[in-house]
Image (cartoon, rainbow, N blue to C red):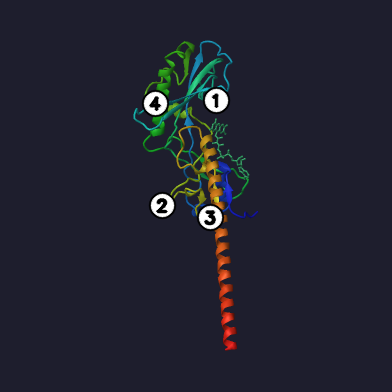
Amino acid sequence: MKARHEYVLCAGAIDTPRLLLLSGIGPAADLAALGIETRIDVPGVGENLLDHPESLILWEASRPIPPMSAMDSDAGLFVRREPGAARPDLMFHLYQIPFTFNTERLGYDVPEHGFGMTPNVPRPRSTGRLTLADARPETKPLLDFRYFTDPDGYDERTIVDGLRLAREVAATEPFASWIAREIAPGPALRSDEDLSAYGRAAHHTVYHPAGTCRMGSATDELAVVDPELRLRGAPNVRIADASIFPLMPSVNPMVTVLMIGERAADLISADLTGRREQTAQQSQQTARQSEQTARQSEQTARKRGQGSRE
Ligand SMILES: Cc1cc2nc3c(=O)[nH]c(=O)nc-3n(C[C@H](O)[C@H](O)[C@H](O)COP(=O)(O)OP(=O)(O)OC[C@H]3O[C@@H](n4cnc5c(N)ncnc54)[C@H](O)[C@@H]3O)c2cc1C
C-alpha cells in the first residue's frame, strides 16, 4: 500500500507504538535487542505511558437503591485542593452500585446494596512504558504503567486526599442517611500510611492509556511527533490518537481524542490545499518561463533572419 500524500496512524496508545516498533521505528537499542532492524531511531516510542488511576471507597446502603440510574455512575465531582489552582486536581466518579472487583479480592464484604466514590488522579505524574516482548506481530506488548511511582508522591497523595474528602462528602446529606456502614477501606483505616496502602492496593485503571508517542518540540528528545502531528524522521506520517498526549487531560480523554482528529483533518487539508496552490503556482511559473523561452527563441530567429538578409 502506498499513499499519494501521507499516512495517518491512529491505532490508539497501545497499537500505534506497537506498530511503529514492529516496523523498526523506535529506540534503536531496544529494537536491536529484539532483532528488529532500525529504520528510524525515535527514542520516545513507547515511553510516557499515562493513565488515570483511581481507587474506591465503598459503603453498604441502608436500603435498596432505586433503579433510576442511566449508567450506574451518573455523577462526577471535580475538586480544587489548592484554592488558587488553575484547574481541578482531584476527580471522582460516583457509583450507585457496589463496585467490588478489587475490594472483594482484598477480602472485603460484598454488600447486596451499596454505592461508592472513586478518587481519581486527573493529572498523574507517574509515567510508564510500553515495550515489545519479541518481534512477532501476534505477541501482545508489555505495559508497565508504574502507577504511584512519581518521586514526589503526588499521585499517592491525591488518592489519600480523595479518600478523606469522600468521607467528608458522604457524612453530609443526601449521602449520610443512605449509609449503613463503610465497607472499604473501613473506618479503622485513618492514617496517611494506611489509606495510601489501601488506596494503591484497591486502585484500578479507568482504561485511559495515552502518551506513548508524545507530541513535543524539536528539542524534546522523547517527542515522537511534532506540533503538526508529524512523525520524527518521517514527515509523511502523522499520528492522530491518544498516544500523542504529552500530559493527561484532567477529564476523560475521548473529547481530546476527537479534537485531535479534527485538528489532523485541518492540518492535512491545509497541506493539500497548500500543495495544490504551490503546484498551480509552479505550473504558472513553468508556463511563463516556457513563453519567455519561446519569445526569446523567436527574437533570436528573427535577428538571424534579418542578419542573413543583410
Ligand atoms: C471500557 C472503556 C470505557 C471507556 N470510557 C470512557 C468514557 O466514558 N469517556 C472517555 O472520555 N473515554 C473513555 N474511554 C477511553 C476512550 O475510549 C479512549 O481514550 C479513546 O477511545 C482513545 O482513542 P484512540 O483513537 O486513541 O484509540 P481507539 O479508540 O482505541 O482507536 C484505535 C482503533 O484502531 C484500531 N486498530 C488497532 N490496531 C489496528 C491495526 N493493526 N489495524 C487496523 N486497525 C487497528 C482499533 O481496533 C481501534 O478501533 C474508555 C475506554 C474503555 C476501554
- In which quadrant of the rendered image does the N terminus lie? bottom right
List the residue tagged with mark 3.
Answer: 234
Q: Residues within 10 Å of mark 1 (few under 14, many from 20)?
A: few
Q: Which residue is mark 4?
A: 161
Distance from disc 3 to disc 4, alpha carbons, whole Å, reads 44 Å
**First in residue order: circle 1 vs circle 4:** 1
Q: Amino acid at mark 2?
A: Thr
Distance (Cα) linking label 1 and label 4: 22 Å
Is residue 132 in view from this perspective? no
Of the residues under marks 3 and 4, which one precedes in the sequence?
4
Disc 3 + disc 4, Cβ < 8 Å: no
Q: Residue at x 57, y 59 (%)?
A: 280
Nearer to us of marks 2 and 1 is 2
The residue that appears at 53% across and 55% down in the rendered structure is: 234
Please, what is the three-letter code of the amino acid marked with disc 3? Ala
Q: How many marks?
A: 4
Element under disc 4:
helix
Q: Earlier in the sequence, mark 2 or mark 1?
A: 1
Q: Which residue is mark 1?
A: 101
Q: CA distance from mark 4 to mark 2?
A: 36 Å
Which of disc 3 and disc 2 is earlier in sequence? Answer: 2
Residue found at the far right of this picture: 1
Circle 1 SS class? helix
Q: Which residue is mark 2?
A: 219
Identify which amino acid the numbered label 1 is placed on. Phe
C-alpha gap between disc 1 and disc 3: 44 Å
